[in-house]
């Protein structure tokens, strides 16, 4: 029988191991050349049912959002075309409900080729919740400390936000991401699968902390814990 410590977010006994970031973001062996693996040394922390199994749908949502981002390397694109499309084909109605305001968008590539893609509305609060879980798990993995307080999430994953004060929000997200990246530029990046994910953790002495993550080499997410 496996033994677990207490949950990384509360004092409840752990019942499973949670991957940080979610395992579904990493390509499966069947989608890779023989002998290549990106799932051998993934980071896990002890978690209770409340903070792991019940958020599996959020993990899947995060996979969909990141794999369809405009940024990222060839692994991001391949992950969307393989894992992403298999998930969509299994439950097309579910995913169409997630793609709010799905709109066709013509996109011209650097070589002048015009192709059709699409845009959709991201549930920013849900995305932030996913990143809060990942950042607090990485923080615990790195420092042994639990973080259950508030956080602020910044990212350059999205092309454009719409709605009230959209321009100011876009600027805040992009500048916040870059500010954290610059502050941690001398901190060595960690992660055994850098083509898929790397991270940095800063733990301050005054209860201010930061976690900087990079997905698919070009999608940045910065999470500030506390008043950092």
Image (tube, rainbow, N blue to C red):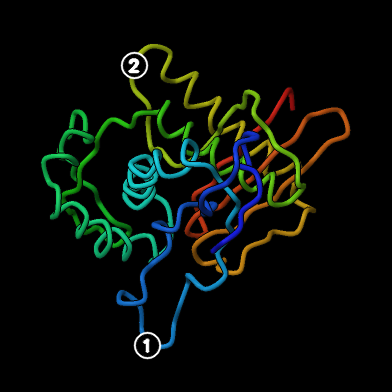
Q: Is residue 2 above or below residue 5?
A: below
Point out residue 140 in the picture as x, y percentages from the top left corner.
Answer: 69, 45
Residue at 83% from the left image edge and 36% from the top image edge? 204
- The residue lying furthest to the front in this view is 1
Q: Is residue 28 left or right of residue 179?
A: left
Quarter assignment of residue 83: bottom left
Residue at 40% from the left image edge and 38% from the top image edge? 158
Name the mark on residue 34.
1
Point out residue 75 in the picture as x, y percentages from the top left corner.
Answer: 39, 66
Q: Which residue is mark 2?
A: 163
- Say which element carries label 1: loop
Q: Is residue 218 above or below residue 78?
A: above
Name the mark on residue 10.
none
Query: Who is closer to the viewer here, 162 or 45?
Result: 45
Residue at 68% from the left image edge and 61% from the top image edge? 190
Q: Are marks 2 and 1 in contact (CB under 8 Å)?
A: no
Q: Is residue 221 left or right of residue 190?
A: left
- The residue lying furthest to the top in this view is 164
Query: Who is closer to the viewer here, 227 or 217?
Result: 227
Measured Cα–Cα span from mark 2 to mark 1: 46 Å
Q: Is residue 119 above or below residue 19?
A: above
Point out residue 156 in the picture as x, y percentages from the top left corner.
Answer: 49, 40
Sort mark 1 into few (<14), some (14-19) or many (20+) by Cα contacts within 10 Å. few
Quarter assignment of residue 126: top left
Sort mark 2 into few (<14), some (14-19) or many (20+) by Cα contacts within 10 Å. few
Which quarter shows the C terminus? top right
Query: Who is closer to the viewer here, 147 or 104?
Result: 147
């Amino acid at each position: 029988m496996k033994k677990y410590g207490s949950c990384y977010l509360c004092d409840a006994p752990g019942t499973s191991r949670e991957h940080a970031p979610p395992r579904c973001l990493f390509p499966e062996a069947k989608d890779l050349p023989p002998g290549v693996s990106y799932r051998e040394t993934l980071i896990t922390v002890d978690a209770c049912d409340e903070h792991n199994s019940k958020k599996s749908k959020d993990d899947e949502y995060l996979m969909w959002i990141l794999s369809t981002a405009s940024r990222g390397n060839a692994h991001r694109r391949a992950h969307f075309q393989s894992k992403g499309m298999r998930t969509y084909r299994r439950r097309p109605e579910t995913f169409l409900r997630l793609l709010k305001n799905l709109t066709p968008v013509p996109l011209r590539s650097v070589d002048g080729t015009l192709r059709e893609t699409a845009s959709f509305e991201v549930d920013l609060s849900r995305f932030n919740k996913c990143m809060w879980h990942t950042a607090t798990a990485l923080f615990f993995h790195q420092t042994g400390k639990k973080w259950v307080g508030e956080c602020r999430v910044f990212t350059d994953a999205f092309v454009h936000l719409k709605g009230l004060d959209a321009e100011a929000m876009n600027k805040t997200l992009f500048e916040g991401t870059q500010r954290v990246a610059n502050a941690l530029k001398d901190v060595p990046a960690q992660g055994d699968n850098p083509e898929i994910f790397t991270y940095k953790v800063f733990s301050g002495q005054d209860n201010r902390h930061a976690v900087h993550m990079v997905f698919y080499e070009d999608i940045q997410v910065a999470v500030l814990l506390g008043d950092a």
